[in-house]
Image: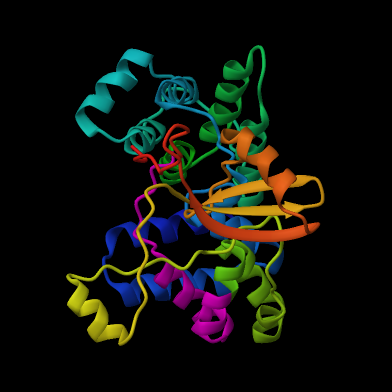
Amino acid sequence: MEYSKLVEVQEKLEKTSSYLDKVELISRLLAETPKEEIRKVVLLLLGEIFPPYESKEIGIGPQLIKEAIARATGYSRREVDELMLSKGDLGEVAEELVKKKRQVTLFRESLSVEKVYSVLRKVSEISGEGSQEKKILWISELLTNSSPLEAKYIVRTVLGELRLGIAEGRLRDSISKAFHVSPELVERAYMFTGDYSLVAERAALGGEAELKNIRIEVGRPVSPMLAQRADSIDEVIRRLGKAAFEIKLDGIRIQIHKKKDRIWIFTRKLENYTSMFPDLVKDSLDSIKPDKAIIDGELVAINPETGKPMPFQ
């Protein structure tokens, strides 16, 4: 699929606030996407390269992006900075400078979804000596071959600054409409996977039957059940009838996944925090006896002198 087709939809999404219009735009795009590219299209549509539980980043900040824009368009860093001051959006800066770029490109390669996705993924894997220069080269190459509108959304995607108003409900309903599957099945599949790109791919490949086959997997976070706020205890009792109460623990909502000698720790937003809690990884390996397990709970700091929970902040 041509990348231009995706960014045209993104541009229309940015300009409409209508729920139904957004669902129509996204569902039509998904229905026209080749099945083998569905995951990449959904991720890029959301301004992502990886699902949240992989906790990987492209690793390029505004200063490197400014350098890439300057190299791709022939403008100086000072000129890029000045335009940024007036626009306040590096995506729009890239769009304008690509539109009137000084650097003449003898041959512009048409960008595909596959090309953009693979380059951004490759950039995320670059590390070590000279990594910043290599990242600038890859991004400037993309911008050199991009149209003004493509440049705008490449830059916003790299910086994680896509603002298209694609909430979970809109994506759920779009997948449902595109592949003629029930929204309840789409939501169930998302709860089990935390990854709408995977859900869309399964729906495209096998419809409702394929969605029904999706199961919880160790190592892939499950969307947690979250409490809803109530204004008072009286309202809680009115809504639930008889109820039991417990103290709200002040900590981090987490899931611990165990598979043999490996542990994953995920947050309520499905982010992978395993590396942040090495002590918890060790304790989990020692304490969780089954080879495979998923545990949902609250990570709480305990005062070693009193044995009582400490304030999280």
Magenta region, residue range = 160-188
Residue at the image position 32 percent from the left and 57 percent from the top: 14
Q: Report the front residue among 231 and 59.
A: 231
The image quarter containing residue 238 is bottom left
Residue at the image position 66 percent from the left and 12 percent from the top: 129
Position of residue 259 in the picture relative to residue 43 (left or right): right
Position of residue 295 in the picture relative to residue 15 (left or right): right
Q: Is residue 160 above or below residue 204?
A: above
Could you say where residue 232 lies in the image, as x and y percent from the top left?
A: 18, 71
Colour pattern: rainbow
Q: Report the front residue among 300 and 175.
A: 300
Could you say where residue 286 lies in the image, as x and y percent from the top left?
A: 74, 44
Position of residue 311 in the picture relative to residue 87 (left or right): right
Could you say where residue 228 lies in the image, as x and y percent from the top left?
A: 32, 69
Q: Quadrant of the N terminus?
A: bottom right
Residue at the image position 38 percent from the left and 39 percent from the top: 310
Q: Is residue 84 visible?
A: yes
Residue sitting at the far front: 306
Could you say where residue 307 lies in the image, as x and y percent from the top left?
A: 45, 40
What main secondary structure does the magenta stretch of the protein show?
helix
